[in-house]
């Protein structure tokens, strides 16, 4: 039986952290057994907001590709590739731009939100307005059925569906309407208690060394009311406890909660348990990252093969698109 196709991408605008692992990558790894999965690094998308300072896009691209593999994406099972090396995405982006009303792009909520958020940059560019259209091209070119993404990406999926529908109506039925695959995952908060994010400077990166991880957790704030070791605490008020919820077993979670409430254990003990459990998740990733870092040819080969395969699939779609739009 032919497997249904799944596609997703990660923007190359920073190093990956535990939030990305729990929220996206682990889910991608699960999907590769059941679906025909295409996963890529969206390096062009990174340029839409970082065009004045592209220096770390390349570094970020490499970090993400390494983490794809280290987290368990298997090139025998899924297709791993680099967006900017499959030029057909750009061709489809251009062709779809002919049929996309400006107003559709202007009303995507992330457009104005991001402009507000990143006030220090001039985002009144064609490229930035076209962000969701480029994403649409990424998805439609593989005629993907499902797109595993976070809730923040739903407006982008919505416009992808609208553009697919418009193409199918104007020319011929080529594109399935892609569906977001929203998965429930525990929220990972950062070391300061806010959502883990590279822009808050509160993330534990997959590339952090064990000492760094340990130090980041050891210096985390806990329940501010728990000043002395003998003061009882409220677990829910401690960001450390929030991380326990994601990384610790049920038994350990109960143990640290009751230890905190009764002042039976101190914050240091509680953090040590968390460190042990985070290390358990990160150790295989560190091992695999080291192997890949010591063997750049291997990484290069995997991405090259994946990109060739993606190109082949993309080209098949493009032949249909070109024909439909009166091109040779
Ligand atoms: N916009 C996505 C994000 O920021 C990245 C992305 C680019 C993407 N192209 C895509 C995701 C295609 C899914 C499908 O996370």
Image (cartoon, grey):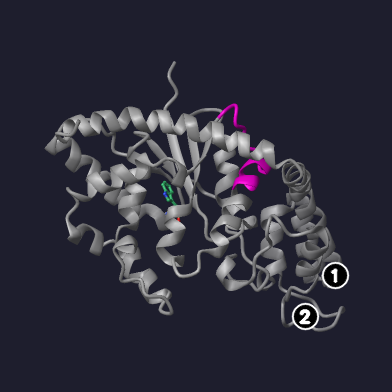
Based on the picture, tell me whether residue 73 belongs to the magenta stretch: yes
Quadrant of image for the C terminus: top left
Residue 244 or residue 6, whichever sits in front: 6
Res. 268 mark: 1
Asked if residue 282 is positioned above or below residue 117 in the image, the reply reads above
| Secondary structure under the numbered disc 1 in the rendered image | helix
Residue 43 or residue 230, whichever sits in front: 43
Based on the picture, tell me whether residue 146 belongs to the magenta stretch: no
- The part of the chain drawn in magenta is 65-77
Residue 13 coordinates in the image, percent (x, y): 52, 60
Seen at 82% across and 80% down, the residue is 231
Q: Earlier in the sequence, mark 2 or mark 1?
A: 2
Residue 179 visible to an observer of this rendering: no
Residue behind mark 2: 226
Residue 84 or residue 110, whichever sits in front: 84
Mark 2 vs mark 1, foreground winner is 1
Q: Residues within 10 Å of mark 2 (few under 14, many from 20)?
A: some
Residue 144 lies in quadrant: top left
Res. 85 mark: none
């Amino acid at each position: 039986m032919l497997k249904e196709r799944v596609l997703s991408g990660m923007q190359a605008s920073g190093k990956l952290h535990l939030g990305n692992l729990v929220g996206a990558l682990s889910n991608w790894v699960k999907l590769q057994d059941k679906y025909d999965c295409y996963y890529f690094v969206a390096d062009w998308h990174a340029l839409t907001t970082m065009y004045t300072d592209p220096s770390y896009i390349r570094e970020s691209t490499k970090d993400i590709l390494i983490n794809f593999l280290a987290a368990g994406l298997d090139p025998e099972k899924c297709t791993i590739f680099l967006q900017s090396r499959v030029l057909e995405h750009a061709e489809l982006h251009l062709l779809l731009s002919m049929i996309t009303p400006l107003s559709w792009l202007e009303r995507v909520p992330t457009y104005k939100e991001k402009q507000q958020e990143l006030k220090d940059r001039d985002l009144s560019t064609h490229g930035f307005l076209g962000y969701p259209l480029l994403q649409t091209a990424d998805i439609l070119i593989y005629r993907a059925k499902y797109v595993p993404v976070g809730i923040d990406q739903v407006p982008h999926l919505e416009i992808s569906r609208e553009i697919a529908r418009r193409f199918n109506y104007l020319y011929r039925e080529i594109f399935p309407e892609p569906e977001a695959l929203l998965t429930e995952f525990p929220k990972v908060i950062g070391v300061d208690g806010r959502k883990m994010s590279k822009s808050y400077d509160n993330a534990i990166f997959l590339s952090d060394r064990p000492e760094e991880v340990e130090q980041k957790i050891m210096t985390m704030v806990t329940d501010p009311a728990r000043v002395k070791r003998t003061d009882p605490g409220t677990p829910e008020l401690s960001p450390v406890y929030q991380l326990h919820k994601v990384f610790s077993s049920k038994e350990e979670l109960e143990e640290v909660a009751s230890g905190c409430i009764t002042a039976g254990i101190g914050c240091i003990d509680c953090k040590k348990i968390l460190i042990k459990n985070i290390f358990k998740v990160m150790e295989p990733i560190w091992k695999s990252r080291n192997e890949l870092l010591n063997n750049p040819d291997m990484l290069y080969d995997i991405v090259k093969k994946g990109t060739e395969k993606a190109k082949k699939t993309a080209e098949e779609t493009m032949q249909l698109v070109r024909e439909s739009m009166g091109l040779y």
